[in-house]
Image (cartoon, helix red, strand yellow):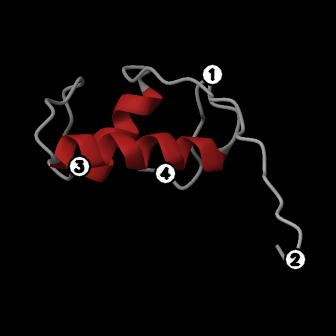
């Protein structure tokens, strides 16, 4: 795989790509079936190919509000 990836339009950053691929790789390691025909058997490579092929669905969640507790309580 090239070090210069052309990300799908739905993936807004390299960080998001790696995050989605890593979560999918964990699913593959737990026994999920690959959604693409991959040359590699390594879960990380398969997951990256799945994300690049738009074979994995994902959505952004809302950020949880931070709760600050004043000191002394």
Label number found at residue 2: 4
Residue ID for mark 2: 71
Pointer 4 with pointer 3, Cβ within 8 A: no
Whole-percent x, y for residue 19 in the image: 52, 47
Does residue 47 lie above or below 73 as drawn? above
Q: Earlier in the sequence, mark 1 or mark 4?
A: 4
Label number found at residue 43: 3
Front-lying residue, 31 or 36: 31
User: 10 Å neighbourhood of mark 3: few (<14), some, or many (≥20)?
Assistant: many
Q: Earlier in the sequence, mark 4 or mark 3?
A: 4
User: 10 Å neighbourhood of mark 4: few (<14), some, or many (≥20)?
Assistant: few
Distance Cα–Cα, label 3 vs label 1 = 22 Å
Q: Which of marks 2 and 4 is in front?
A: 2
Q: Is mark 2 on a helix, strand or loop?
A: loop
Q: What element carries label 4?
A: loop
Q: Residue at x 40, y 49 (%)?
A: 22
- Quadrant for the C terminus in the image: bottom right
Q: Which residue is drawn at 20% across and 41% down?
A: 28
Residue 27, located in which quarter of the rendered image?
Answer: top left
Does residue 41 lie above or below 37 as drawn? below
């Amino acid at each position: 795989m090239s070090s210069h990836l052309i990300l799908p339009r739905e993936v807004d950053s390299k960080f998001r790509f790696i995050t989605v691929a890593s979560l999918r790789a964990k699913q593959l390691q737990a026994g999920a079936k690959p959604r693409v025909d991959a040359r590699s058997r390594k879960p990380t490579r398969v997951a990256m190919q799945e994300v690049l092929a738009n074979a994995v669905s994902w959505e952004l969640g809302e950020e949880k509000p931070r709760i600050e507790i004043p000191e002394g309580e």
